[in-house]
Amino acid sequence: MSTTATVVTLVAAFMAGFSGASIFFGAKFTVEPLAAYGVPRSWWNWLGAAKAAGAAGLVAGLFVPAIGVAAAIGLVLYFTGAVITVLRARSYAHVAFPMVYAAPAVAVLALI
């Protein structure tokens, strides 16, 4: 794996992990929009766990590439769902946020 791929993978893992942790710790900038989008509170821990698992999978992918590919695909699908959720809530000004988190995962797939 190239240095670029390693750095992008670590950045993507950090961003996904940060996003997951922000749900677990109840950061206002994360949980208030989730509530506004109509995401049920009972889903929040699962969503945070999915992001954390994606982050861990990306890091594991540095050693076992197939795990990294699976994690990156999972994160791309997760954040695609987030974009759809934001669009369905008609919160168009917030569409960029899940796309910013998805971009490094897409880059990981492109670089592997």
Image (tube, rainbow, N blue to C red):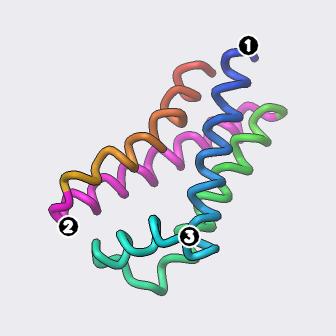
SS label for mark 3: helix
Which sits earlier in the primary sequence, circle 1 or circle 2? 1
Q: CA distance from mark 1 to mark 2?
A: 40 Å
Q: Report the residue at 31% width, 52% height from top.
A: 83
**Quarter in which the C terminus is drawn:** top right
Which sits earlier in the primary sequence, circle 3 or circle 1? 1
Which numbered tag is attached to residue 23? 3
Name the residue type under label 1. Ser
SS label for mark 2: loop
Q: Mark 2 sits on what residue? A: 89
Image quarter of residue 81: bottom left
- Viewer-nearest of labels 3 and 1? 3
Q: Is residue 78 magenta?
A: yes
Q: Position of residue 93 (x, y in %)?
A: 22, 52
Q: Position of residue 46 (x, y in %)?
A: 56, 74
Q: Mark 1 sits on what residue? A: 2
Q: Position of residue 38 (x, y in %)?
A: 29, 78
Name the residue type under label 2. Ala
Is 22 located above or below residue 4 in the figure?
Answer: below
